[in-house]
């Protein structure tokens, strides 16, 4: 049995809120890309970012609930998320490379 301190519960909530904030930023930039530019490639990249933001919001909720349940039951487990950060970095790299390639091959939006 593990002694759960309040700072662990607050840390879980704080991490969840940070991930949700990042998902909101991704979704906002995706919507701006979909509706702010006229070409189809930028719209596709915007849709990709919105899908990533939805995945990120669902994953952060899943991770928050998993950690909260483990803390409530005072389980001795590793509370780190091995999938979420790597998935977000991969999605950001794909969108960055896609945006760069799109700008190079379409003339930079001219």
Image: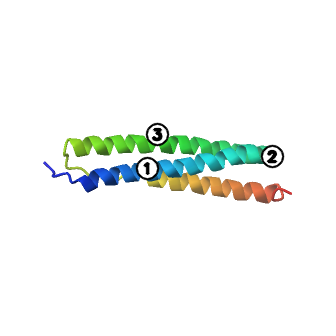
Q: Cα distance, mark 1 to mark 2?
A: 34 Å
Which label's residue is closer to the chain start, 3 or 2? 2
Disc 1 packing (10 Å; few <14; some 14–19; many ≥20): some
Q: Cα distance, mark 1 to mark 3?
A: 13 Å
Residue contact at pointers 1 and 3, CB within 8 angstroms: no
Q: Please name the residue that numbered disc 2 is placed on.
A: 39
Disc 1 is placed on an element classified as: helix
Q: Cα distance, mark 3 to mark 2?
A: 29 Å
Location of residue 28 in the rendering, given as x and y in whole percent from the top left corner: 62, 47
Quadrant that contains the C terminus: bottom right
Location of residue 48 in the rendering, given as x and y in whole percent from the top left corner: 63, 44
Q: Please name the residue that numbered disc 3 is placed on.
A: 58
Location of residue 50 in the rendering, given as x and y in whole percent from the top left corner: 61, 43
Disc 3 is placed on an element classified as: helix
Figure check: 35 above or below 105: above
Task: Write down the quadrant of residue 90 in the picture.
Answer: bottom right
């Amino acid at each position: 049995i593990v002694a759960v301190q309040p700072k662990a519960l607050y840390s879980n909530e704080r991490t969840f809120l940070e991930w949700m904030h990042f998902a909101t930023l991704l979704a906002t930039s995706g919507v701006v890309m979909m509706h702010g530019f006229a070409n189809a490639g930028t719209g596709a990249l915007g849709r990709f970012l919105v899908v990533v933001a939805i995945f990120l919001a669902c994953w952060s909720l899943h991770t928050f609930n998993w950690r909260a349940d483990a803390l409530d039951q005072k389980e001795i487990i590793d509370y780190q998320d091995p999938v979420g950060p790597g998935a977000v970095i991969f999605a950001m790299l794909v969108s960055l490379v896609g945006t760069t390639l799109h700008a190079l091959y379409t003339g930079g939006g001219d």
